[in-house]
Structures are given as structure tokens and as C-alpha cells.
Image (cartoon, rainbow, N blue to C red):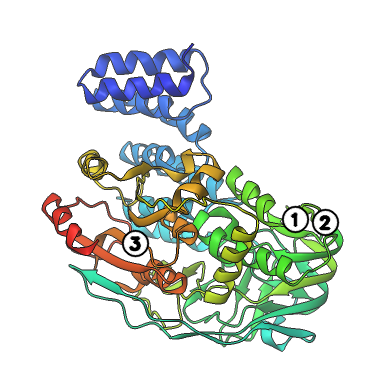
């Protein structure tokens, strides 16, 4: 008997064959049986919308938006339809709901796209946005002093300042980002007493002090917990307002890994997992738990369990928690949650030290993976195409591009759709990885050193953010070719069409 996923896939095949009515009937059948998938509700909404049945479309969009978890395409289309029908209040209330609790960074991208499309006076949207970033509704205690992590006592340097070895990184059809810094700061470990940690937060509270990582530039960078109104850095960079959330949890000890990075595979691989490998490398006693925020994907917990010592507990921090004796590491990347000015519609200044990765920390994780026998031991190498199926940064001629690389002998994969061990095994054999910008490219971490990574992208007016994957490739010792398509645009997350004639030129790069 076919399961719901197979039936939904069959409905998509009907669409490709131009059998819209058959596809619609199949998704209706899934809906009537109460499928747990969100996609059939979304497809039914789209069908109704294009048949000008807005009332039915609205109902299906609402059901799809309630069921979707990681993606936010239904929420975006639902609120855009409400906006088109003049119902701004309900649209904003839906986003308020989505933003009221812990959420993945891509919900913010979808929300900003929604705001950019609002057709009513912008003051309403502006007021709503301000209410999300430190509005007057939140009570705060006295100011606490904002301090940098490096001033903490009991600091132990675990890696020296390290040179980032140059590798080949080339940009095509776009302006190259400014040259990155060539050194990554030393990594240190701190033993801190009486640390108060919060879910999805990079700020640790100790008495009347708020401690943040050294690299944060409060004139440019934005904390995740500032966006969720847990804290507000004040002008001058030396004071912090902290929300009066009740401290509900209490632990004797733990390694602080509560960052928002848990919500995105690329950030998780490069910001949390290297610290886990360092914890094991430093032989921190196995009774000391890893303190993490609630994951958004099962694969994150699976990978944590693969890499950590079998006896080491994992504690999920769901509220403010006091840790009597905590262990805290300096960050393994200089990747902030967001740039403050971009939220205000102003040009962002990207420092050469932004978006860097610690080669030593990544090497520690790779060594840990190898020592545990994770990944393929075969000499055979494969070429991998990472197929991204997302509502953001879409390749509009995706089918043609996938067919091209399939015909060229590439293994086509959507990493999030395959078991974790298979995912690691595949990328550990990859000599070439091609894909559009997205978290799936971070699987280059598993590839043998010297792999060739080819990134397909829209064409940015500001190339600054596009140094993220090239800098990751440099830190891993890979080669990279970064190819932009279409005219320059100010939108970082724009859809784009891959010029098929350009793909033939890729053969020269391989």
C-alpha cells in the first residue's frame, strides 16, 4: 500500500504531465483522510487560488500554515492572500504567533519578505517590527554591565591564533567580496560560576553582568536574543538590558551550547559540533552534560549522539537556567545572527573578520569523525549535486539543472531527505560538490580535503554575505568556484535562473 508521501509524489507527477484536475483530486483524497503532510493542503490552496476561489484557498492555506514546521512558504502565501484581501490585522497576528516562540532563522527571512510586500502605509509594519525588537511591553531590571568573554577569569587557551591557509576561490559574473582576514583568533575555554543561560541565546548572565563573545560589534551585529526581546544592547556598547524572565531551571554543571545555531544545519555543523569535538578532545569528564536549545531537526540530535562520548548527557534548555559551574568556549566562527543595519534598511559594513571559521576547530571535528569510523573508507570518489527544494533562493529552471547534472554522472541528493549516516557517507566520498547557496553545502565539512566546491547563486549587488561558503571552504582546505546568474540585485535571497550555456563552461573548472 502506498503511503502519503508516495501519493503526494504521484500528484506532483500529474502536475508535470499537465493533469491538474487529477493532481487536485489526489491531494483532496489525502486531505480527506487527514494526512499529517502540509504539502497537500498547500497544493489544494494553490489550485483554488488560481481558479479564483479565494475563500477555499484561504481555508487550505490556513491548514497548511498550521502544519508546516521548518518551511514557511504556506505562512507567507497565506498572509500575502490576507493582505491582498485587505485583512492586514490577521496577517500580522499570524506572524506575531510565528515569532512569539523559538523559531528557525528562515522564519525571519519569510517575515521580512512579507513586510516588503505590504501595500498599506508602512507605519503599521514599522510599528509591528519595533514591537518585536525591544518594545516597551517588556519589563527589564537594572542595567547590567556588558562585558566581553575574554575578561572572564579561569581562561584556558586551547588553540593558538591560527593562519587560514589560502586556497583557490574564484568568483564569476559578480563582484568579489573584500579580502577576508587571514588569521582566526585563539580559541579559549572558561570555567564560570553562577552562569544564567537562556534558550537560543549567545549571552550569559553572571550577577549584574552580561557576557558576550569578543567578536560581536554592537554597531553592526544583532543578537538573536535581541530580536526576541530577551536583551537590548545600549548605545556605547557597555550596557545591556535583560528581560525579567524567571529562572526556572537549575543544573550543577554543563557545557554552554545554547546558541540559535542549533536551528540551522550549516550553523550547527560549524558553531556547535566543533566545540563538542573539543570537549571530547580535552577529555572533559563524561558526567558533564551538553546544554543545548531545543533542536529543529532530528538529524542534529543524531549527529550529537554520534560525536559525543556515549555516556555524556544532553540537557535541552527550554527556559532561563542557572548553572552552578559551567564550561564555556569562545566561538568557532565569527558569524553573527544578523546585521543590525540590514534590519533598518541601511547598508551593512562587512568587516574582513566577519564570516570566518576556525580551521583548528573544524579539523578537530573532522579528526573526531575519522577516529569514530564515521563516513566512507572507500577510495572511490563521486560527484555530488545538492538539490535545494526551498521557498528561498530557488533555481527557477531547477528540473533542467538537475537533469543536466544527473546526465553528467552526478549523484543528486537532498541531504535532509536521507538518513544521517548515508548523508555523511556520500559527502565523505565527494571530490566535487555543486549546489546553490544553502545549508546543504555545509556538508563539504565531510568531504576529503581539496574537494572542488561549485556554488550557484543569484547576483548580489553587495557580495559581502557571499563570503560565507568561500571562507568555510578555505578553512577546510577546499577549492571553490562561485558563479552568479542574472543581473545584480539588492535582494540577498532572490530566485534565479541558471544559464544552461554556463554549465558547459563548468567542465573547464572541474
Tell me the SS state at disc 3.
Answer: strand
Residue 119, image x and y in percent? 29, 50
Where residue 248 is drawn, which disc sits there? 2
Report the side of 24 relative to 508 (left or right): right
Above-or-below relation of 399 to 332: above
Examine the rendered structure and indicate whether residue 205 appears above or below residue 118.
Answer: below
Q: Is residue 189 left or right of residue 137?
A: right
Q: CA distance from mark 2 to mark 1?
A: 6 Å
Q: Is there CB contact under 8 Å for labels 3 and 2?
A: no
Residue at x 79% of width, y 59% of height? 289
Q: Give the side of residue 345 with respect to residue 376, left or right.
A: left
- Is label 2 in contact with label 1 (beta carbons under 8 Å)? yes
Q: Position of residue 429 (x, y in %)?
A: 44, 52
One can see residue 301 in this view: yes
Mark-to-mark CA distance, 1 and 3: 40 Å
Name the foreground residue: 510 vs 117: 510
Amino acid at each position: 500500500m502506498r503511503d502519503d508521501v508516495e501519493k503526494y509524489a504521484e500528484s506532483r507527477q500529474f502536475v508535470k504531465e499537465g493533469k491538474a484536475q487529477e493532481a487536485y483530486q489526489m491531494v483532496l483524497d489525502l486531505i480527506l483522510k487527514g494526512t499529517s503532510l502540509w504539502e497537500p493542503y498547500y497544493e489544494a490552496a494553490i489550485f483554488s487560488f488560481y481558479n479564483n476561489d479565494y475563500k477555499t484557498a484561504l481555508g487550505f492555506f490556513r491548514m497548511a500554515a498550521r502544519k508546516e514546521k521548518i518551511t514557511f512558504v504556506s505562512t507567507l502565501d497565506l498572509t500575502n492572500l490576507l493582505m491582498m484581501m485587505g485583512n492586514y490585522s490577521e496577517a500580522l497576528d499570524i506572524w506575531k504567533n510565528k515569532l512569539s516562540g523559538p523559531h528557525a532563522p528562515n522564519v525571519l527571512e519569510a517575515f521580512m519578505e512579507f513586510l516588503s510586500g505590504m501595500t498599506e502605509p508602512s507605519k503599521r509594519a514599522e510599528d509591528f517590527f519595533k514591537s518585536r525588537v525591544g518594545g516597551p511591553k517588556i519589563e527589564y531590571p537594572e542595567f547590567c554591565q556588558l562585558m566581553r568573554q575574554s575578561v572572564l577569569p579561569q581562561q584556558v587557551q586551547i588553540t593558538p591564533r591560527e593562519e587560514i591557509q589560502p586556497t583557490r576561490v574564484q568568483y564569476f559574473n559578480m563582484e568579489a567580496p573584500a579580502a577576508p582576514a587571514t588569521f582566526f583568533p585563539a580559541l579559549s575555554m572558561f570555567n564560570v560560576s553562577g552562569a544564567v543561560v537562556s534558550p537560543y541565546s549567545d549571552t550569559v548572565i553572571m550577577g549584574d553582568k552580561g557576557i558576550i563573545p569578543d567578536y560581536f560589534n554592537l554597531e553592526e551585529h544583532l543578537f538573536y536574543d535581541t530580536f526576541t526581546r530577551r536583551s537590548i544592547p545600549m548605545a556605547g556598547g557597555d550596557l545591556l538590558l535583560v528581560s525579567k524572565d524567571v529562572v526556572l531551571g537549575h543544573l550543577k554543571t554543563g557545557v554552554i551550547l545554547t546558541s540559535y545555531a542549533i536551528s540551522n544545519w550549516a550553523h550547527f555543523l560549524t558553531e556547535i559540533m566543533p566545540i563538542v569535538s573539543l570537549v571530547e578532545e580535552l577529555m572533559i569528564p563524561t558526567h558533564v552534560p551538553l546544554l543545548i536549545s531545543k533542536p529543529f531537526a532530528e538529524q542534529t540530535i543524531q549527529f550529537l549522539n554520534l560525536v559525543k562520548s556515549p555516556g555524556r548527557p544532553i540537557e535541552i534548555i527550554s527556559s532561563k537556567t542557572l548553572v552552578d559551574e559551567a564550561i564555556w568556549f569562545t566561538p568557532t566562527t565569527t558569524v553573527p545572527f544578523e546585521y543590525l543595519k540590514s534590519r533598518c534598511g541601511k547598508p551593512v559594513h562587512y568587516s574582513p573578520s566577519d564570516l570566518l571559521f576556525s580551521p583548528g576547530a573544524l579539523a578537530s571535528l573532522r579528526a573526531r569523525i575519522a577516529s569514530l569510523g564515521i563516513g566512507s573508507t572507500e577510495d572511490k570518489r563521486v560527484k555530488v549535486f545538492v538539490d535545494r527544494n526551498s521557498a528561498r533562493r530557488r533555481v527557477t529552471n531547477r528540473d533542467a539543472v538537475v537533469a543536466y547534472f544527473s546526465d553528467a554522472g552526478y549523484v543528486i541528493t537532498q541531504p535532509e531527505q536521507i538518513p544521517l549516516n548515508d548523508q555523511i557517507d556520500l559527502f565523505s566520498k565527494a571530490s566535487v560538490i555543486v549546489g546553490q547557496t544553502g545549508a546543504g553545502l555545509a556538508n563539504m565539512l565531510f568531504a576529503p580535503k581539496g574537494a572542488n566546491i561549485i556554488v550557484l547563486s543569484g547576483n548580489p549587488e553587495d557580495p559581502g554575505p557571499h563570503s560565507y561558503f568561500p571562507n568555510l571552504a578555505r578553512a577546510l582546505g577546499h577549492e571553490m568556484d562561485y558563479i552568479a546568474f542574472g543581473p545584480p540585485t539588492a535582494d540577498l535571497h532572490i530566485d534565479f535562473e541558471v544559464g544552461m550555456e554556463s554549465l558547459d563552461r563548468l567542465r573547464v573548472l572541474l
